[in-house]
Amino acid sequence: MKRIVILISGRGSNMEAVVRACHAEGWPAQVAAVISNRPQAAGLQFAASHGIATGVVDHTRYASREAFDEALAQEIDRHRPDLVVLAGFMRILTPAFVSRYAGRLLNIHPSLLPAFPGLHTHRRAIEAGCKIAGATVHFVTAELDHGPIVIQAAVPVLPGDDEAALAARVLAKEHVIYPRAVRWFVEDALQVDGLQVRHRTGEPQLVL
């Protein structure tokens, strides 16, 4: 039984999707804890209501990013995770933190990486005249919003789209692909070779 720790900063809708899928699909795993860097993160209430341990490591109480990451890692490690899932966790992690969880740290980014790393992805996609946008689940490396890609989902950019409309369309796909990627990890279904990630039995890694 694999143990999953999820990090959030706000509502944690992707966290909710993972928790619901884990229960509904009977994964060989449990969400052991949900941890936030913000005490008022709404997702903590959802986790607690589902009997999941919660924790807060408030980043404003630490003088450096390194000190915060060390405190966060200590809180994570109390729950003995096999996998750490970033679900709207709005902190840039230090290389030491990333190295500590190398190969067992997943993130979702609201673009078709390597396009549009960083913030304001939907606005940038619209401004660039993209005809498709989407989301990417990837293993985390020290380089921001880069790392071996597990699965992607694509949606059309429609005439008249604004950031909110495109974001909503992408988010719906995020709730499909993130639980799928986490399930593949806990089922030991992923084969990583450098930057290439393959599903061992060939399940599609692109959702349209």
Image: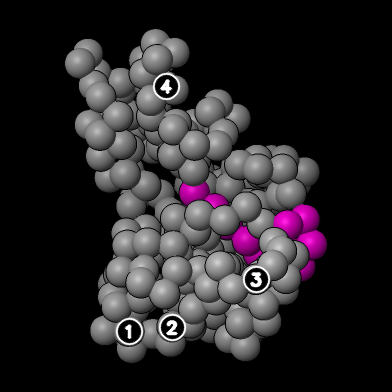
Crowd band around label 3 with a 10 angstrom C-alpha radius: few (<14), some (14–19), many (20+): few
Residue depicted at 40% across the width and 15% down the height: 127
Amino acid on which the number 3 mark rests in the picture? Tyr
Residue depicted at 67% across the width and 82% down the height: 74
The stretch in magenta equals 94-108
Q: Secondary structure at mark 2?
A: strand
Query: Vertical placement of 174 versus 68: above or below?
Result: above
Query: Vertical placement of 63 versus 144: above or below?
Result: below
Image coords of residue 17 (percent x, y)? 32, 62
Numbered badge on residue 125: 4
Label 4–label 1 contact, CB within 8 A:
no
Q: CA distance from mark 3 to mark 1?
A: 25 Å
Number of the front mark, 2 or 3: 3
Q: Mark 3 highlights which residue?
A: 62
Answer left or right for 188 relative to 205.
right
Label 2–label 1 contact, CB within 8 A:
yes
Q: Secondary structure at mark 1?
A: helix
Numbered badge on residue 48: 1
